[in-house]
Image (cartoon, rainbow, N blue to C red):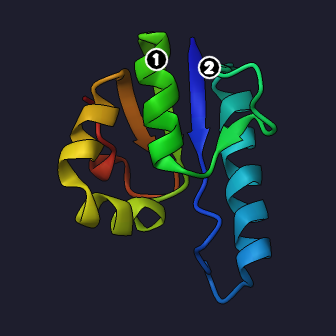
Amino acid sequence: MNAIMLVNENLSLQGLSKAESKQLQINCLTNYMKTQHLKEKTLNPYQLNPYYTIPHALFYDIKETRQLVDYLLIHSYEAMQSFISMYPARWILLKSFFRHTIYIEDDSRLADLS
């Protein structure tokens, strides 16, 4: 199974700085991938990081490659809330390229199993 991580680098979680929050998200997502035996999926060979920080860039890359990916991993709903509110149609289209969208720090009932 393959997965793509989406990290919000402009979010302050649990009173941490933005840089610390970004690292917290990356650590949690990476640990989740290891425990679930998921492999990182790279869509763009020129990608600098093994994760995305810009949902629009992820949408562009996945639309260009036309690949269906097993999992989209996000730290929490809070990490994507502003994007979802501002671009609801784009969010629905983005999720359609994934079998499952998982918010790993939220209650499992909130996980989007699309």
Disc 2 or 1, which lies upstream in sequence?
Answer: 2
Q: Position of residue 86 (x, y in %)?
A: 26, 65
Left or right, 72 with respect to 14, comes to left
Label 2 crowd bin: few (<14), some (14–19), many (20+), radius 10 Å: some
Amino acid type of the residue tagged 2 in the rendering: Leu
Q: Nearer the viewer, mark 2 or mark 1?
A: 1
Q: Quadrant of the C terminus?
A: top left
Label 1 crowd bin: few (<14), some (14–19), many (20+), radius 10 Å: few
The answer to whether marks 2 and 1 mark residues whose Cβ atoms lie closer than 8 Å is yes
Q: Position of residue 62 (x, y in %)?
A: 47, 23
Residue 64's disc number: 1
Q: Is disc 1 placed on a helix, strand or loop?
A: helix
Amino acid type of the residue tagged 1 in the rendering: Glu
Residue 43's disc number: 2
Q: Position of residue 40 (x, y in %)?
A: 69, 23
Q: Quadrant of the N terminus?
A: top right
